Amino acid sequence: MWKRLLHTSDDVTDLILRLALAAVIFPHGAQKALGWFGGYGFTASLGFFTTKLGIPTVLALLAIGAEFLGSLGLFVGLLARVAAFGIFCNMAVAVAMVHSKMGFFMNWAGQMPAGNEGFEFHILAMALAFAVMVRGAGPVSLDRVLSGKR
């Protein structure tokens, strides 16, 4: 099982997909986990998920971990498929619970109240995550090293 989970290719495209997903998701995870980039931090984010959205604490912890720890794992290519799966699930839940109600488009023009964003970003993140789940971390990854490839 581990060998299959860590298997990856030599294709630099896989590296680019993985790093793009990590770069886009990391700020969102750092907002929730650390309060960076204008975020509310761990306690407030956990409270929002559990109180406002009604998400069970365990699942809220997994959501924060998927974005923060998952993006860090993607940066170094460690358990990239697992990290991508967590991010994929997180984005799917975000669309289903929150963003589908706000339409497709992001709020680029500021026509909706702050924080009201459509789900176009989530579709792109899910596509990147799916590609990493299928293809693996690519070259220059800890998954590659752990799989025995050099």
Image: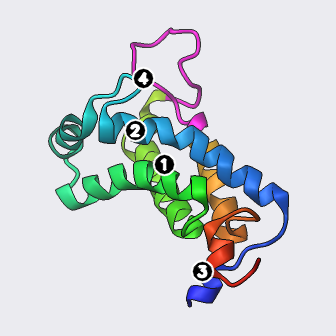
> Which segment is the magenta one?
103-121
Q: Residues within 10 Å of mark 1 (few under 14, many from 20)?
A: many
Q: Give the farthest residue toward the bottom.
A: 1
Circle 1: residue type: Met
Mark pair 4, 3: CA separation = 37 Å
**Amino acid at pointer 3:** Leu
The answer to whether marks 4 and 3 mark residues whose Cβ atoms lie closer than 8 Å is: no
Q: Position of residue 58 (x, y in %)?
A: 22, 61
Q: Which residue is mark 3?
A: 5
Label 2 Cα crowd, 10 Å radius (few <14 / some 14-19 / many 20+): many
Tag 2 or tag 4, which sits nearer the N-term?
Answer: 2
Measured Cα–Cα span from mark 2 to mark 1: 16 Å
Q: Which residue is mark 1?
A: 91
Q: Which residue is mark 4?
A: 116
Marks 4 and 2, how far apart at CA = 20 Å
**Image coordinates for residue 124, horizontal then vertical, percent:** 65, 43
